[in-house]
Amino acid sequence: MVSHINTVSKAMDPVHRHANTLKDPQKMLIGGGIIVSLVLFMYLAITQSIMQPVLMVIGLLLGYTLFHARFGFTSAFRRLMSVGNGEAIRAHMVMLGTATLLFAPILALGISFFGAEVTGYVSPIGVSLIVGAFIFGIGMQLGGGCASGTLYSIGAGRSVMFITLIFFIIGTTIGAAHLPFWTEDLPSLGTFSLATSTNLGYGGALVVSLLTFGLIAYISKVVEKKKNSPKVAQLPSARSWKRIFRGSWPLMVAAVALAVLNALTLMTRGEPWGITSAFALWGSKVAEFIGFDVASWGYWQGEAATALNASIFADSTTVLNFGVILGAFIASAAGGLFKFTKITKGNFMASVIGGLLMGYGARLAFGCNIGAYFGGIASFSLHGYIWGIVAIGGTFLALYLRPLFGLSVPKSNDSVC
């Protein structure tokens, strides 16, 4: 008999993969989510620059897209390493290809909506990147989701992800305190951009990037066919235009949408989409409140000190994060799927360890699956590619750790993964 598994343990995922019918919309929750979003939008419009409410709307759309497609980075890496399924990885390549097509002219010409100086995420390649990406890869497999997955899963009601988020914040705060050691005392080769560190320019770097994405997609297809890997389980969905609001979106549609939204983020605030710098800010503010001399940390020197002393609502990454959570909440309620889930001893401990590893790793690696992998590669930074390779290595190790906490791993004889 062929078994059916979920991509994560049932206790950690409110979306039952075997369900074949849509549930009724949770209208009260939808209304509540819209009201909270409007209140936050108005507050930002009154108290902050016009950029902040615009970013909140972009965050809403990001969260809405992530949930509707269940667009994952954690599950994509896990399926690839466990059974060779590359469906989600190919969606990543479409997302990255679309993003680089959009980023290239934006970065080359400095296009922005509000006059901000436009810069991509190009970070150093060194020991901190290797260590950080590796432990992040382990952490996201234990914590039940990556940085974006943590936010949209909270919006969908996965109770254990609140634990992951708390320890994610703690981990990234500790990482911020330790960062000068990793970046200043340990070897680093500096930054390397395919566009500006070579003679390729943005046009040549774009061609090289697109060819690379195509090659990775092709290899994933070959591996998938060779291993005869199980397909990704299909989720119930509405038909025609109703699918925009209810049910699942095709991965490729979401991939393009996420790339466009990331480009809009770049033009709005002058930087690509990021997540975990806000976690460091939140945790550092709490640490300062309870008596730690956070202002003396190397991480909070220079321009960063302004963010530490200002309201969190003045931080663009914080606003994006709030938007992602609210967008996912509205999307889950529209599908009738918002529900707090059971926390077990196993997934609790996995979330604690996974959250700490992701938080600490994200600071060391200059970002997470969004800031380093997505934003870095879209910005033509070599560190983004290295992050992805090393994080996949961490994922491979975590496949042997997940069962210790009662978490599932796809098997080659599963009907779906």
Image (spheres, grey):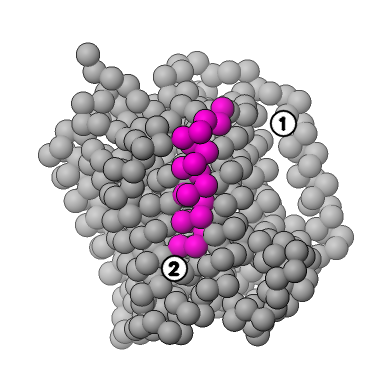
Give the residue at x 50% y 16%.
Answer: 21
Sequence-wise first label, 2 or 1: 1
Is 219 in the magenta?
A: no
Check disc 1 and report the residue beneath it: 30
Give the residue at x 52% y 30%.
Answer: 344
Mark 2 or mark 1, which is nearer to you?
A: 2
Which residue is nearer to you in this view: 6 or 209?
6
x and y, in percent, of residue 10 in the image:
46, 27
Task: Count residues near mark 1 (Cα–Cα under 10 Å), then give few for <14, some for 14-19, many for 20+.
Answer: some
Check disc 2 and report the residue beneath it: 365
x and y, in percent, of residue 135 in the image:
39, 58
Which residue is nearer to you in this view: 54 or 325?
325
Q: Indicate whether 139 appears above or below 314.
A: above
Mark 2 → mark 1, Cα distance in angstroms: 37 Å
Quarter of the rendering containing residue 24 = top right
Q: Quadrant of the C terminus?
A: top left
Q: Residue furthest left?
A: 226
Instruction: Give yes or no for contact between labels 2 and 1 (Cβ–Cβ under 8 Å).
Output: no
x and y, in percent, of residue 377 in the image:
39, 66
Say what secondary structure mark 2 lies in.
loop
Give amino acid for label 1.
Ile
Give the residue at x 79% y 42%.
Answer: 36
x and y, in percent, of residue 179 in the image:
51, 75
Q: Magenta part of the protein: which range?
A: 342-361
Q: Quadrant of the N terminus?
A: top left
Left or right position of 202 against 312? left
Q: Indicate whether 93 appears above or below 15.
A: below
